Image (cartoon, rainbow, N blue to C red):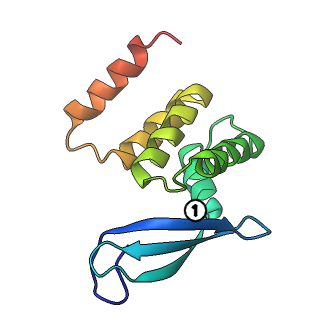
Amino acid sequence: MKCPFCGHLGDKVVDSRESKEGEVIRRRRECLGCGRRFTSRERVERQKLIGGLLKACEKRPVSVASLEKIADRVESALQDKPEKEISTEEIGAFVMNELRRLDKVAYVRFASVYRHFRDIGEFMSELKDLLNAKE
């Protein structure tokens, strides 16, 4: 997060609190550049996550309820982490793991967008890994 005072990109979280509804997380941050403190408010992007899951599962025999459960597990993982921050890479990997168990085609669709395969070789490698996996 960029410091509003000096523009430095490094900071540390000194306090985190959820709103009563659980939709917004308030974080007190300290800039590692100038040492000043500032507040950020972060909203859990549940609808964005559900939208991506719905797109991956389009025309697949997957219920909306099962996608809601994945979103619930992502939110729980966010809330259970002691540092209260999770990177988009971690969220993407978590979602791909969940989709891999739920529906292989949806997993491949999500992975193809999330991982930005550069060529057909990378895509085929992922498919081979999926086919060879013992689950």
Query: In the image, is residue 4 above or below residue 8?
Result: below
Q: Nearer the viewer, residue 26 or 46?
A: 26
Where is residue 59? Give x, y as percent: 62, 42
- Give the residue displayed 28% in from the left and 84% down from the top: 7
Residue pictured at 33% horizontal, 19% vertical: 128
Residue displayed at 67% across by 46% down: 76
Q: Specify whether residue 58 is in view.
A: no
Residue located beneath label 1 in the image = 48
Q: Which residue in the rendered view is the most extreme toward the front? A: 35
Residue 104 point in image, percent of width and height:
52, 28
How many numbered marks does the figure carry? Answer: 1
Query: How busy is the neighbourhood of tag 1: few (under 14 within 10 Å), some, or many (20 plus)?
Result: few
Which quadrant: the N terminus? bottom left
Report whether residue 42 is seen. yes
Say if 31 sits above or below 115 in the image: below
Q: Residue furthest bottom?
A: 5
Secondary structure type for disc 1: helix
Which residue shows up at 72% across the image and 47% down it? 68
Kindly identify the amino acid type of the residue bearing the numbered disc 1.
Lys
Residue 126 versus residue 48 in the image, above or below: above
Instruction: State which quadrant residue 132 falls in.
Output: top left
Residue 112 left/right relative to 74: left
Instruction: Decide which of 50, 59 is in the foreground and name it.
Output: 50
Q: What percent of the width, then of the height, locates residue 15? A: 56, 67
Left-right relation of 60 to 2: right
Q: Quadrant of residue 130?
A: top left
Foreground: 35 or 65?
A: 35
